[in-house]
Amino acid sequence: MKKPSIRTITVKSLINVLLVIAIIVLVITAYNFRALSKKAIENQALAYVELVKAGLTSHMKAGIMNLRDYYLKEIQQLDNVSELKIIRGDNVSKQFGAGNPVWERINPDDKVRKALGRSEPVFVLNEFSLHPTIRVIIPYVATSKGALNCLVCHAVDEGAVLGGVDIKMDVTQYRNQAAIVMAVIFTISALALLLVVVNTSRTIRSFVQIPLEELVEKAMISYNSRLPVPLEKFNSKEFTNVAEEFNMFNSQIIAHQEELREKNRQLLDLNDEIESTLRETVFTMGVIEEQRSKETANHTKRVTLYSQLLAEKLGLPQEQVDLITAASPLHDIGKLGIPDEILFKPGLFNEDEHRIMENHPAIGYEMLQHSQRDILMAAATIAHEHHEKWDGSGYPRGLKGDEIHIYARIVAVADVFDALYSPRVYKEAWPLEQVVDLIGKERGGHFDPALVDIFMDNVNAFVAIYDRYPATE
Ligand SMILES: [Fe+2]
Ligand SMILES: [Fe+2]
């Protein structure tokens, strides 16, 4: 599921909060504005009523009550007065008789009775109709106080209700005005809300989202390049702090890596030393065997170098070339197990002596086979199989062709070449042509044909090795 961004979450929660606030503010404003408007309308109605009252009183004082209709007509024609009625109280009716039905409300309704009964104004606001109106009924109460002493003209007690005015006004203008003001407030609120949301969204994008993405990107570059994240890229304190923390953390990791690399290098050095110690030890063991068997001088060294040359020319992987180079010095290590009287016997061996002499591959294998080290395992194989022949006529097991390990096939060529080309106590050194001739004849007999071909192509290199480490001083 795709997760929302910080910006979306913030803007959503901001909209929720602002909407609630806006609704509350609008409701409160609307309520107060309505109350204010209502009060203003009532005040205007009261002013008209006072005007009617003053007019009627002045007509009465002037003794021209019969001319009051002109006055009332003028009042009624005022802009928003839609209806105007005089209410004649019982006391006044008794004193002056019934009134004129054109201007007077002859049959009082509930509202009129309520206003006159309680001596209090009654307001009836009809604000939800297409043409909203307000009806105001104001009682006239007789009083002797002030400039206007009612009791002079009216034969009533103090505080008696003389009558009243029932006036109806059109308030469409007020209602429309109120609606416009509310619409303006609503629009301004909506615009303010939009502005806050857009601004917040932009702020989060500029100061949170983009710096965050940049920090991630710069952190990766910084880790790879080992350079610190540039702090001036960030405007806010928080992101600068995070970048600083990251730089500290990164430099610690880099230091740890350096430490590990150094340790690893030391380990590799140590491993190299162990490997070379093992190689030298193995070579020395070969030399010990060479000395004890009274082999021609440098036989071990030369066989090692011929084997390396053949392995390289055959195209073996470097790892295997190194292995055969390290292991070939031990090819005759089994001779250490052959009794002196047989090993050093001048002249030819009898059948039993031959059998004992031919035990040296098995003895060598026995000596070396227990090791788990690659070099000694290779040496065990070479010691065991270096007298096997390609055509299966060799010893000790009569292995054939590919059954003989490639290391042993290589050492066989190297060992025989050196035996023939060097002088021995029992023979002269063979001339090179004769050696090459014999090895050629044994192609596919004693030797692997592929190795004989390589030998033939590299006779000079073999001779060069012999000349560098000769059998005689
Ligand atoms: Fe041998
Ligand atoms: Fe040998």
Image (spheres, rainbow, N blue to C red):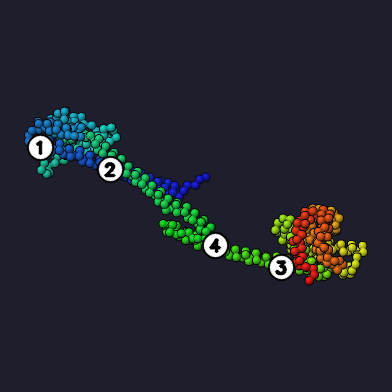
Q: Residues within 10 Å of mark 4 (few under 14, many from 20)?
A: some
| Disc 2/disc 4 C-alpha distance (Å) | 69 Å
Question: In the image, what residue type sits under mark 4?
Answer: Ile
Q: List x then y, in percent, for residue 201.
A: 41, 48
Reading the chain from its start, which is encountered first: label 3 or label 4? Answer: 4
Mark 1 or 3, closer to the camera: 3
Tag shown at residue 33: 2
Task: Tell me the residue that label 4 is attached to.
Answer: 254
Say how many tags the image has.
Answer: 4
Mark 1 or 2, closer to the camera: 2
Quarter residue 367 falls in: bottom right
Q: Helix, strand, or loop for circle 1? A: helix
Tag shown at residue 58: 1
* Residues at marks 3 and 4 touching, judged by CB atoms closer than 8 Å: no
Q: Is residue 422 left or right of residue 111?
A: right
Look at the image and tell me in which quarter the C terminus lies: bottom right
Q: Is residue 106 left or right of residue 238?
A: left
Reading the chain from its start, which is encountered first: label 2 or label 4? Answer: 2
Reading the chain from its start, which is encountered first: label 4 or label 1? Answer: 1
Q: Helix, strand, or loop for circle 2? A: helix
| Disc 2/disc 3 C-alpha distance (Å) | 102 Å
| Disc 1/disc 3 C-alpha distance (Å) | 139 Å
**147 relative to 108, above or below:** below
Reading the chain from its start, which is encountered first: label 1 or label 2? Answer: 2
Q: Helix, strand, or loop for circle 3? A: helix
